[in-house]
């Protein structure tokens, strides 16, 4: 009996680590594959040795191995500190879009908007002059300049810009009566068919809406809540492309997925207007809402250390678009997932790799009335204008960014389930993938 238990345990561990090696090779994670290969022998061999070799004290070694294995399984399976009383950080005041780096980047010296903004925010002028001295996003003379990648990204952003005229449109005169539950289910399923990985619905709150527009002709425009509901969509950014961050292939992927999420939002908004209800799409460069806050309220994720939405299956490796509407809908619950906040409190990997120290190593602090992390957006954006890309190193190394497959989902389940497992898994992520992994080569076909 003792021998059978040992053989089965050893075989289980052997197969698990072999599976991890295969998955890592498929993901081009050679460093991880080598470490998992060591794990094959390190973890399974002791069970086989004890099963087949006779020695004194065998029963003690047998007990030690089985107790260790069972402890590991219990750590993984037993829920522990899963959802401590955790309240999501709600901004005390609405966010002004003029303060975002994209808006500040659009200010042209000598224009009325430029004068207006720095008259009201003289402290920001010195910092912003620093990024204005650099070559800029997608420009020649940047450290990551690549004519093909930058032209591809530019093509995606230009296409999105051309689509902005469609965020609003004529509402059909005849209103078709709808069942809120049925149309909510339909829209979720249809958006996934259109390419979204997830879709959630929330009741729109004042803090979801920018107080004032900051980009293009919307500079200075006051935004008011005119719709009751919001649908948020996430689309996946390709893992292999993100792993190359901060190379040009990263911004190429960002542009493509902003376009994809925006396209889905435009189609959904048009669909709703055809049913006779108001709907507006919020797409890159034309948002009236703060997408991560809407998506969090719609149950699509939490907001972590780097200030981005952390989704359950892809972590921060997503782009978001939103549709606001008066179509009657059934809302989803926020996740209220304390495990992500707890993981971010321990992990700090994104802060470690950030080339400009823009991500805080500290615990959450009260910022504009709510307990959260805030990155140094000036440092981050200034680096973008030097690199020419949107960097993305933080997204690429996050332990939640691993691909959506059985191996990583198993780990995600354990991390969600138990705080003890979370601690071990975060350490193991460093062991298997490196604390500061180097950017990966660009995928075949884009070299
Ligand atoms: S890298 Fe770590 S600290 Fe940063 S967002 Fe991801 S889990 Fe949180
Ligand atoms: S995008 Fe780059 S510079 Fe910005 S916070 Fe992330 S790692 Fe830092």
Image: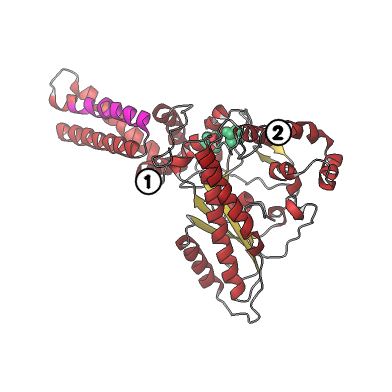
Q: How many marks?
A: 2
Of residue 142 and residue 76, the one placed in the foreground of this image is 142
Residue 56 picture location, percent across and down: 16, 17
Distance in Å between CA atoms under marks 2 and 1? 39 Å
Magenta segment range? 29-48
Vertically, is 369 above or below 434?
below
Q: Would you say the residues marked 2 and 1 are in contact, meaning their CB atoms lie under 8 Å apart?
A: no
- The residue under label 1 is 405
- Residue farthest toward the top in the current orientation of the protein: 56
The question of residue 32 being in magenta is answered with: yes
Q: Main secondary structure of the magenta part?
A: helix
Check disc 1 and report its element: helix, strand or loop: loop
- In the rendered image, residue 56 lying in the magenta stretch gets the answer no
193 lies left or right of 11: right
For the residue carrying disc 2, how many other residues have a C-alpha within 10 Å: few (<14), some (14-19), or many (20+)? some
> Quick one: 276 or 94, which is closer to the camera?
276
Q: Quadrant of ligand 2?
A: top right
Residue that badge 2 annotates: 131
Quadrant into which the C terminus falls: top left
Q: Is residue 101 left or right of residue 82?
A: right
Counting from the top left corner in percent of width and height, residue 296 is at 59, 51
Residue at 60% from the left image edge and 66% from the top image edge: 269
Instruction: Using the rendered view, name the quadrant where residue 45 is placed.
Output: top left
Give above or below for 107 relative to 47: below
Q: Is mark 1 within 8 Å of ligand 1?
A: no
Asked if residue 161 lies left or right of residue 411, the reply is right
User: Residue 270 placed where, x, y %?
Assistant: 59, 69
- Colouring of the image: secondary structure
């Amino acid at each position: 009996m003792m021998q059978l238990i040992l053989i089965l345990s050893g075989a289980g561990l052997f197969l698990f680590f072999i599976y991890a090696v295969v998955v890592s090779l498929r993901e081009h994670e050679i460093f991880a594959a080598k470490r998992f290969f060591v794990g094959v022998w390190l973890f399974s061999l002791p069970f086989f040795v004890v099963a087949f070799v006779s020695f004194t004290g065998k029963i003690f070694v047998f007990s030690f191995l089985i107790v260790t294995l069972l402890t590991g399984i219990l750590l993984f399976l037993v829920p522990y500190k899963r959802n401590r009383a955790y309240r999501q950080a709600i901004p005390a005041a609405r966010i002004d879009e003029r303060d975002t780096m994209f808006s500040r980047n659009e200010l042209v010296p000598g224009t009325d908007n430029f004068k207006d903004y720095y008259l009201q925010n003289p402290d920001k002028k010195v910092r912003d002059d620093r990024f204005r001295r650099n070559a800029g996003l997608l420009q020649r003379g940047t450290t990551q300049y690549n004519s093909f990648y930058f032209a591809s990204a530019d093509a995606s952003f230009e296409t999105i810009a051309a689509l902005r005229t469609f965020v609003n449109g004529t509402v059909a005169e005849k209103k078709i009566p709808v069942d809120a539950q049925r149309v909510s289910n339909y829209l979720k399923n249809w958006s996934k068919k259109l390419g979204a990985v997830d879709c959630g619905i929330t009741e729109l709150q004042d803090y979801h809406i920018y107080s004032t527009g900051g980009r293009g002709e919307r500079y200075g425009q006051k935004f008011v809540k005119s719709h009751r509901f919001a649908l948020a969509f996430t689309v996946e950014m390709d893992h292999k492309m993100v792993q190359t961050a901060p190379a040009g292939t990263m911004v190429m992927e960002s542009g493509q997925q902003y376009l994809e999420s925006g396209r889905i939002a435009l189609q959904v908004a048009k669909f709703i207007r055809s049913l006779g209800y108001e709907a507006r799409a919020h797409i890159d460069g034309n948002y009236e809402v703060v997408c991560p806050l809407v998506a969090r309220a719609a149950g699509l994720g939490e907001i972590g250390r780097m200030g981005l939405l952390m989704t359950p299956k892809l972590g921060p490796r997503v782009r978001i678009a939103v549709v606001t509407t008066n179509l009657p809908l059934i809302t989803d619950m926020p996740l209220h997932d304390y495990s992500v906040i707890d993981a971010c409190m321990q992990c700090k990997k994104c802060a470690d790799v950030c080339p400009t120290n823009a991500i805080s190593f500290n615990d959450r602090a009260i910022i504009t009335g709510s307990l959260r992390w805030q990155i140094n957006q000036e440092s981050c954006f200034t680096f973008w204008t030097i690199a020419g890309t949107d960097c993305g190193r933080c997204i690429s190394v996050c332990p939640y960014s691993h691909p959506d497959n059985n191996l990583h989902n198993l780990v995600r389940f354990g991390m969600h389930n138990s705080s003890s497992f979370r601690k071990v898994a975060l350490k193991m992520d460093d062991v298997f993938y490196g604390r500061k992994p180097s950017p990966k080569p660009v995928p075949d076909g884009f070299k």
